[in-house]
Amino acid sequence: MKVAILGAGGMGCAMAARLVDTGHQVMIWDRDPEGASRSNGSAIAVTADLSAAVGDASVVITMVTNGEAVQAVAERMVPAMRPDAVWVQASTVGADWADRLGVLATTHGRTMLDAPVSGSTGPARNGTLTWLIAGPPAAVATARAVLDSLGERVLVVGTGQEASRVKLVVNTWMTAATVAMADALTAADRLGISRATLLEVISGGPLAMPYALQKAQLMTDRNYTAGFPVELALKDVQLTEQAEGRQPPLVRAVEERLARAVAAGHGRDDVAAVAAVD
């Protein structure tokens, strides 16, 4: 299947490489004229022409930073898409922006799947992402081969923009779990308990959370190579607050911790870097 990926960041490039490996034809484009060169794949076509990127694609995936960026791209992209193509809007943009983008697609007679993806660059490259999907069943069917190539689970949660709302809650939950793990490790250190003992107790039972255990290893190794950058986690937590219209105490505490990590220079590091700040 012919696929256009708009956004040559870590996730976009990982998706492109995986799709090529699974037999799709991929064209990648980035707002930065030189950005698409980061895709580093001879089988991945690169273009600086947005219309050329999407004009012959059956599926168009947007994977950029935020709602404003998606809209700026989509205003040029949507009219250039084939009428029967499906726009897979995979960026995490929050509830309000998802609604606006859905209206933009409808206004131009195009179909958008609200499809914020759960996972980072490693799962994208390995095809083990989890897709949260909302949109018309026919559009899901059209995009299914691409979704299956990139993810091991495709969860259809609605027919409108429900997926973006689910994604905000999921990201807030996993970020809160990361902060909790950082503080649990600090508590173990201060109480003279080895981290290995703590993690052995947590692992293998009802308290085990693979994601948090993975972050615990990164924190112990002080390896903050970005999978899910702190600055993006902060953005998502703030989007959750905007959607809710309030700041629950736990969410506010998580936001403050992320903000301190960004201020300390960890914005582009993995969210595990919250362990580096109190």
Image (spheres, helix red, strand yellow):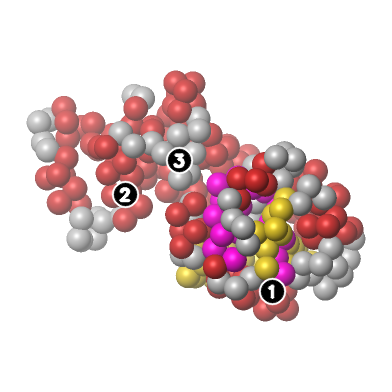
Q: Which residue is mark 3?
A: 226
Task: Report the front residue among 160 and 63.
Answer: 63
Q: Camera-side residue: 99 or 79? A: 79
Q: Which mark is residue 1?
A: 1
Residue sitting at x 67%, y 41%: 35
Q: Is residue 141 visible?
A: yes
Task: Provide the residue span drawn in magenta.
Answer: 1-20
Q: Residues within 10 Å of mark 3 (few under 14, many from 20)?
A: some
Identify the image quadrant of the N terminus. bottom right
Q: Decide which of tag 2 and tag 3 comes sooner along the chain.
A: 2
Identify the residue at the far left of this view.
Answer: 192
**Residue 107 x %, y %:** 89, 59
Q: Look at the numbered disc 1 and give the secondary structure of its residue.
A: loop
- Between the residue at mark 3 and the residue at mark 1, the CA separation in whole angstroms equals 30 Å
Specify the amino acid type for callout 1.
Met
Give the image location of residue 116, x and y in percent.
60, 56
- In three-dimensional space, the C-alpha distance between marks 2 and 1, rounded to whole angstroms, equals 34 Å
Asked if residue 267 lies left or right of residue 108, the reply is left
Q: Are marks 3 and 1 in contact (CB under 8 Å)?
A: no
Left or right, 251 with respect to 278, comes to: right
**Residue bearing the label numbered 2:** 214
**Residue 265 drawn above or below residue 255:** above
